[in-house]
Each structure stands twice: as C-alpha cells, then as structure tokens.
Image (cartoon, grey):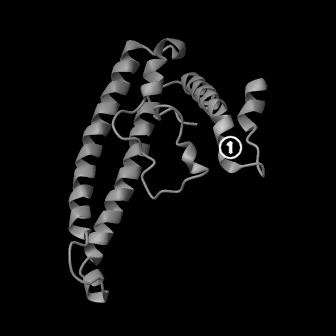
Amino acid sequence: MCTINHAAFAKPGYLIDTPCQSMAPAGALFTRLLAHHAELGLTGEQVTGLLDVSREYHDKQVALRLEFARVTEQLEVKWGRVDAEFVNLRKDLIAQHAELFATDEALFFEYGERGHALLSDRQIDAAEAIYHREKDAGLTALTPSLNSAVGPAFTFTACQEAAAA
C-alpha cells in the first residue's frame, strides 16, 4: 500500500532485487492522490495542502541528497592502498553517510504523515484501493515476463487470481 507516492507501483524489485537504496521516492509526493483528486473527493484546500507538503519534502530531500553526494565523494577511493589506516580515516564519514541515509528515509515518513493528516480515513482507504488496482494491473501485464524470468519451477499467478476476484 502506498498512498504517498510511487509513480507506477511500488518497486516490484523488492521481491527480486535487493539494492541498498532509499525506498523514499525522489521528488514529488502524493502524485497518485492528486491524479485521482476527483475520485477521492479532495477539496481545493486538501489539494493545495498536499502540493505544499510535497514541495517542502522535495526541497528538504534535495538538500539532504546534495550533502549525501558531497560525503560520498569524500569517501571515494581515488588513489592509494585501502588498508586499516585508510578505512580508519573514513570512519566519521561512513557514520555521517549512514546518518544522512537514515534521515532521508525518515523524511519520507515524516512528510507522508503530514500529508495523511490532511485526508479522511475514507480518502485513504479509497487511495489504497486505487494503488492496489494500479499495481495489480501493472504486475498482471508483466506476468508473462515474470514467468519467463523465473522459469518453469515457479509460475506467477497472484495478480491473475486477484484480478479475477
């Protein structure tokens, strides 16, 4: 379930790909809610509030990610031997890097909470239904490719069964 933001559907790679990257979407939040504003019955005040929360999130995220890039550059191995002394000299940078990553993750939840505070329970329930409908349609479209990728030992059917229900 994501009523905050995933442009298409939540990274389906969670099941088949395990990169060490933020789950927080870059840029705008609440795009699905805003795209379905009429179906969700969003008021003008709610639309403006979601846009304001999204913009503030974006501004803070850009600042965080610029700092993350700066620290990443300092951590990079550009020359010389990587040994205990080399690593020891970067311990503070490694800790700072990890803290910036954690702050980026927390920012997503902080702003998600702020946006959800603008919505009724009925609107959140309806947005969840929209999300699952769109996710299931996307995964159903990928079913032949997923089945081909995993081979005959496994057949992907969950979305087909959900779509039939």
Q: How many marks?
A: 1
Task: Answer with the quarter of the image where residue 95 lies.
Answer: bottom left
Q: Measured along the vertical axis of the image, is residue 18 above or below residue 111?
A: below
Apparent side of residue 121 relative to residue 79 in the rendered image (left or right): right
Image point 22% across, 51% down: which residue?
66
Apparent side of residue 153 relative to residue 5 in the rendered image (left or right): right
Apparent side of residue 94 relative to residue 142 in the rendered image (left or right): left
Would you call the spot at circle 1 few (<14 residues within 10 Å), some (14-19), or many (20 or more)?
A: few
Image point 55% across, 25% down: which residue?
127
Compare residues 17 and 29 and report the one nearer the observer.
17
Q: Position of residue 24 (x, y in %)?
A: 42, 45
Compare residues 95 and 11 and report the one nearer the observer.
11
Which SS class for mark 1?
A: helix
Image point 34% across, 32% down: which residue?
54
The N terminus - image quarter: top right
Q: Measured along the vertical axis of the image, is residue 136 above or below residue 41?
A: below
Q: Position of residue 46 (x, y in %)?
A: 40, 20
Amino acid type indicated by mark 1: Ser
The C terminus - image quarter: top right
Residue at the spot of label 1: 148
Q: Position of residue 140 (x, y in %)?
A: 66, 31
Q: Position of residue 134 (x, y in %)?
A: 59, 26
